[in-house]
Amino acid sequence: MPAAETYDILVIGSGESGKYLAWTMASAGHRTAVVERKLIGGSCPNIACLPSKNIIQSAKVRSYTRRAAEFGVDLESATTNMKGVQARKRKMVDGLIDVHLGRYQASGAELIMGEARFTGDRTVDVELNDGGRRQLRGERVFLNLGTHATIPDVPGLSAARPMTHVELLDLDRLPEHLIVLGGGYIGLELAQAMRRFGAQVTVIEAGRQPLGNEDEDVSAALVDLFADEGIALHQKTRVRSVEGGSGRSVRLVTEGPGGEHAIEGTDLLVAVGRTPNTSGIGLDAAGVRLTETGYIDVDPHLATSAPGVWAMGDCAGSPQFTHVAFDDFRIVHDNLTGGTRSTAGRLIPFCMFTDPELARVGLNETEARRLGLSYRLLTMPMAAVLRTRTIAEPRGFMKMLIAADSDEILGFTAFGAEATELLAAVQTAMLGRMPYTAVGGAIYTHPAMSEGLTFLLRNTPVLVSA
């Protein structure tokens, strides 16, 4: 094999962190290459964040057809056309890929489609997708490897060939009865969407509640939502074995509070967690150390154990959100250009795009109790926000945690329509260290969802002792 081609910047993986670093550094005059095995732009624009929200929006439109009379609209008939749903999503994805290719061309970063494997210090062998091989070396190397869906070790599960979110989001047919393993963000978002399209849906959660890291009142509100939408939700339930094949007929033997039961369906979705894409790429040859759980071990500046090598995004153990991966890019780029930005103390928003949405930033009550913190609490039903009356979406609530001995905002949670947008105002205030009284004193547009902060913060906080 000929001598390795040398680049100033070599990025493995074209996800959120990797692509922005490549485009930025190439635009600044650095010879830059990105190796991507399949998905141009990573999972977010192709098979995850944006496609899922596209399909969730189609499901929301479908739900409105069932409520048409409530809005004074007469419909003779309304049915789900999954081929049409997918056509809309695929058109969006194709357009996003074109945007990405344009950014590569404009920046001068070279996109190399193939499978990379380290053969030594900052050196990879790339098996090209269109045939042949190239050996590349980077003066500085950046790992943006991502994760994939975890398939738990349950007898018969792998043989049943279950779907992950990747396959479900590309399904041209509507499952008759979808069984979802996992009550986290992915499982709950897609369960609701499929139910709204018309599928029968059952969710199985091994923990004591869906969204195990959220407060009990948040989980209870989601349980009520799913019950109202006709989704069967089994909590504290473990799958002991699986028979059959997803797409035809599956039978799950489960054990829960009521003992052992069999649940039968046509399709199976696994959404129980993520596994980092760190095996089989030769990271040991590159001197890159992993954690006990298989993620890349990084310092607060996202540098690895190997000199001149950084890791970003999910594979570095960062919270698994695209907005966090983008911040990883900012941290790395800042340190490459003389700054000192780090992952320490990041204020990260957690958002789930069910309908209504769930949005949280900072501490929730569960975390405050775990830390032994006393706090003051403000709560208000979303129905008190007049905007919810105009759009006929009064479900949910919002609450804010305030320090016991000052007016500092410790955290905010909203479960309701447009909650993810409402969150931004509070997050900005928290970043600016504004007291909650200043947030409440702002003039908000009427009738906008943000106006709810006025009414929430007019109340007197209640002290909750540690």
Image (cartoon, rainbow, N blue to C red):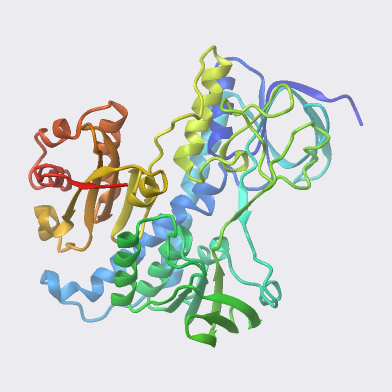
Q: Quadrant of the N terminus?
A: top right
- Residue at the spot 68% in from the left edge and 29% down from the top edge: 304
Query: From the viewer's perspective, is 245 left or right of 76?
Result: right
Q: In this view, does 22 lie above or below 89?
A: above
- Residue at the spot 43% in from the left edge and 69% down from the top edge: 191
Q: Which of 127 and 427 is in front in this view?
A: 427
Residue located farthest toward the right when viewing the structure as drawn: 1
| Rendering coords of residue 237 (x, y %) | 51, 75
- For residue 345, what is the image quadrant? top left
Q: Can residue 344 be seen in this view?
A: yes
Give the total of numbered labels: 0
Q: Is residue 73 visible?
A: no
Query: From the viewer's perspective, is 71 left or right of 214?
Result: left
Residue located farthest toward the top when viewing the structure as drawn: 338
| Rendering coords of residue 435 (x, y %) | 20, 30
- For residue 124, what is the image quadrant? top right
- For residue 193, what is the image quadrant? bottom left
- Residue at the spot 47% in from the left edge and 38% down from the top edge: 324
Q: Is residue 248 above or below residue 389?
A: below
Query: From the viewer's perspective, is 173 left or right of 228?
Result: right
Residue located farthest toward the front when viewing the structure as drawn: 465
Q: In this view, does 186 lie above or below 315?
A: below
| Rendering coords of residue 453 (x, y %) | 15, 43
| Rendering coords of residue 360 (x, y %) | 33, 47
